[in-house]
Amino acid sequence: MRRASSSAMGVVFHDPGIGDAPIDVLSQMRARRIADMDREGITMQAISCVPFLMYPDVDADLGAAIAQVSNDAMVALAEGDPAHFVPLASVPIQNPAAAARELERAAKLGLRGVEIPPKSDRPATRRIRLREFFGKRRRRSDGGLHPSI
Amino acid sequence: MNVIDMHNHFIAPEVIDYLGREGKHYATRIVERDGRRFS
């Protein structure tokens, strides 16, 4: 099981499928991240939810519920420092129609793109769902597929 | 030159709080040990 050696915030998440992964907490992360960015010459960060917290394998209603919580919080992050952070939405990709609805809601809130979790289905099913999701989007937003973890 | 880092992750406290309440539906559990939170 992975431990949070890189988790200076002392917060670790564990998922039965993948083990522990570190997380940052909003109240502590902003200044630290900006200091890191300045040191490394980074102008902006595109920030998304940790992929396993998109829960692509749960019921779509649950996936939508946690996506909304995360996306609402991402808005607060962006509003706090739009010069440094570009928030990306998470969506319940297990239901492409619900995912498109949540992306629309998130875009209205100010999120500027979307990230899709990896390994949400068998490859063939995933292709179908992604095609349906991107076909249902009502507005163009930048999207990314997270690398496999 | 503007440099944009495209791969960063973030979990809001609201998400942690939500999973603290609803984690059973996600096969996720949060516990605290030695002042650190684990799940």
Image: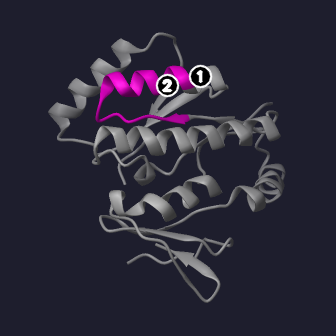
Circle 1: residue type: Ala
| Range of residues picked out in magenta | A89-105
Residue closest to the eye, B22 or A92: B22
The image's mark for residue A18 is none
Instruction: Give the chain of mark 2.
Output: A
Asked if the stretch drawn in magenta spans residue A91, the answer is yes
Residue at image location 41% in from the left, 53% down from the top: A52
Q: Residue furthest top?
A: A138
Asked if the stretch drawn in magenta spans residue B12, the answer is no
Q: Can residue A91 be seen in this view?
A: yes
Q: Is residue A117 visible?
A: no
Above or below A45: residue A25: below
Q: Residues within 10 Å of mark 2 (few under 14, many from 20)?
A: many
Residue at image location 53% in from the left, 46% down from the top: A49
Residue A93: image location, x then y, percent:
34, 34
Q: Which residue lies furthest to the bottom in this view?
A: B34
Circle 2: residue type: Leu
Residue B9: image location, x then y, percent:
58, 50
Left or right: A146, with A139 as reference point: left
Secondary structure under badge 2?
helix
Residue closest to the eye, A100 or A38: A100
Residue annotated with mark 1: A107
Residue at image location 43% in from the left, 58% down from the top: B22
Residue annotated with mark 2: A103
Q: Which colour scheme is used?
A: one colour
Residue A25: image location, x then y, percent:
68, 60
Q: Are marks 2 and 1 in contact (CB under 8 Å)?
A: yes
Instruction: State which quadrant residue A84 falls in.
Output: top right
Instruction: State which quadrant residue A111 falls in.
Output: top right
Left or right: A104, with B2 as reference point: left
Residue closest to the eye, B25 or A26: B25
Residue A103: image location, x then y, percent:
49, 25
